[in-house]
Image (cartoon, helix red, strand yellow):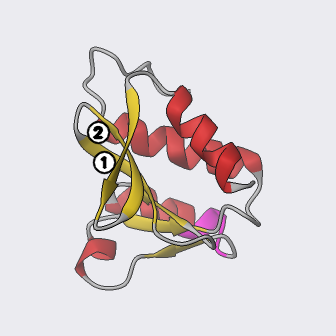
Amino acid sequence: MTDDELVAFALSLPEAMESSHFGNRDFRVRGKIYLALPSPDFCVVKLTPDQQQMALATAPDHVLAVPGGWGAKGWTRVFHSVAGENTIYALVRQAWRNVAPKSIAPPED
């Protein structure tokens, strides 16, 4: 998936908007970051530690915990240029759901 395709999907989620954080593009819902694009090689999504462990187990060639304390909190790198679309969509949607208010987040699939 290209950066443009990822951005289009990220912005298609309810109330999503683009911003920046430390000079990197990020995507937020009501001010909370769920996705960042710090590199052309990967994006970073906000998962819970349990969700991150599941992603690492199911897509070990396409995801990696962010080094250090952020990774321990669930922040996860997704190598979107090589990962399958279903994996990317699921992880980005979950990251959005993790920060979106329950009043706008649809039930999990």
> Magenta stretch mostly in which secondary structure?
helix
At 24% from the left and 42% from the top, the residue drawn is 32
At 66% from the left and 66% from the top, the residue drawn is 59
Start-end of magenta stretch: 56-60
**Crowd rating for badge 1 (residues with CA inside 10 Å; few <14, some 14–19, many 20+):** many
* Residue 88 image offset from top left, x and y in percent: 64, 50
Real-space Cα distance between discs 1 and 2? 7 Å
The kind of residue on which mark 1 rests is Ile
Q: Quadrant location of the C terminus?
A: top right
**Is residue 46 rendered to the left or right of residue 61?**
left
State yes or no: discs 1 and 2 in contact (Cβ < 8 Å): yes
Q: Quick one: 33 or 53, which is closer to the camera?
A: 33
The kind of residue on which mark 2 rests is Val
**Is residue 30 rendered to the left or right of residue 6?**
left
Q: Quick one: 31 or 107, which is closer to the camera?
A: 31
Q: Quadrant of residue 99?
A: top left
How many numbered badges does the structure rendering display?
A: 2
Q: Which residue is mark 1?
A: 33
At 69% from the left and 76% from the top, the residue drawn is 61
Query: Tag 2's secondary structure?
Result: helix
* Residue 92 image offset from top left, x and y in percent: 52, 45
* Residue 64 image offset from top left, x and y in percent: 52, 76
Q: Is residue 22 above or below residue 11?
A: below
Q: Quadrant of residue 45?
A: bottom left
At 42% from the left and 45% from the top, the residue drawn is 95
The disc placed on residue 99 is: 2
**Crowd rating for badge 2 (residues with CA inside 10 Å; few <14, some 14–19, many 20+):** some
> Which-is-in-front pick, marks 1 and 2?
1
Q: Is residue 94 magenta?
A: no
* Residue 27 image offset from top left, x and y in percent: 40, 45
